[in-house]
Image (cartoon, helix red, strand yellow):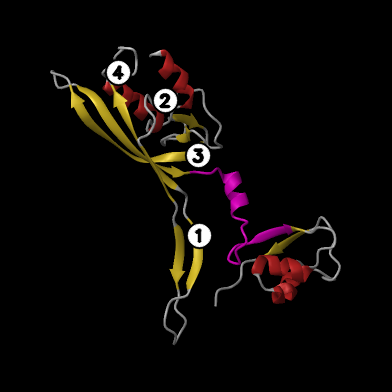
Amino acid sequence: MDTQSLAKLPFNLKIIQTDKDGVPKLAVPFIAMFNPEQFAITETVNWQEDPPPGKDGKDLTFLKIQPREFTLEFTLDGTGVNTNGVKVPVTAQVVLFRKATTTIEPETHRSPYLLVQYGTFICNCILKSSTVTYTMFDMFGLPIRAKISASFIESTNSKLNSIMSMLSSPDLTHYVGVKDRDILPLLTYRVYKDQHYYLQVAKVNKLKNFRSLTPGTMLIFPPLAKK
């Protein structure tokens, strides 16, 4: 590889295997010879359509945000154009990509957890799909250039999921730590956007005096029953 390309290599697209908590493993990463030609991120918000009786239009109820999906497209080259004439077979590069992304692990019996890093974009994820398109061949019919289009789904570990689930939605159970000068109606409003449920919250938490909360106490705010 020429000096200029070698200097840029640490900034190239990297796909690294990790454990389920997102910690990189001692495995050979896949480092792209060329950076992505296209990079697309998709974010999907799920809504439930619930039109009010006797009214036109639709009242959308927020359900959840799906994990991000992103697609990368990059080139594999076996002509030596970017490696000072040293030809790295395209088939070997495809094997390295598949080994990093789709090899079934004997311990977990599943494809590996991944960390994809390109520039300032860093994401723990799993591979959803990949397509290899061979675009150039030598006189013997062997591929010497190809394009990979790979789609990934963002993945967060169980500990982080527990934290993320405590978003301010009335359809989720919340655990709120009491701070000095907190009052129950205000905490209730923060969770449900309606302070009038504070008596029910006091009952759930078996509070004898909801007007005087003890700092450090953990209160439970259960999900609201759907009408």
Neighbour tally class for label 3: few under 14, some 14-19, many 20 plus, Cα within 10 Å: many
Q: Are marks 2 and 4 in contact (CB under 8 Å)?
A: no
Q: Do the residues under discs 3 and 4 have CB atoms within 8 angstroms?
A: no
> Mark 4 packing: few (<14 Cα in 10 Å), some, or many (20+)?
few
Where does the magenta region start and end? 155-176
Q: Give yes or no for residue 119 being in the magenta stretch.
A: no
Where residue 211 appears, as percent x and y from the top left, is 84, 71
Are discs 2 and 3 less than 8 Å apart at CB?
Answer: no
Instruction: State the SS at label 2.
Output: strand
- Crowd band around label 2 with a 10 angstrom C-alpha radius: few (<14), some (14–19), many (20+): many
Pick whichever of labels 2 and 3 is earlier in the sequence: 2
Sequence order check, earlier mark of 3 and 4: 4
Report the residue at 59% width, 73% height from top: 225
Task: Tell me the amino acid under the disc marked 1.
Answer: Lys
86 or 202: nearer the viewer: 86
- Ranked by sequence position, the earlier of labels 1 and 4 is 1
Q: Position of residue 202 (x, y in %)?
A: 76, 70
Residue underneath mark 3:
123
> Where residue 64 is drawn, which disc sits there?
1
SS at circle 4 = loop
State the separation of the CA atoms marked 1 and 2: 34 Å
* Alpha carbons under labels 1 and 3: distance apart: 20 Å
Query: Which amino acid type corresponds to the residue marked 3 in the rendered image?
Result: Cys
Q: Which residue is mark 2?
A: 31
**How many numbered dots are placed on residues in this image?**
4
Marks 1 and 2, the one that precedes in the sequence: 2
Q: Amino acid at mark 4?
A: Val
Residue tagged 4 = 81
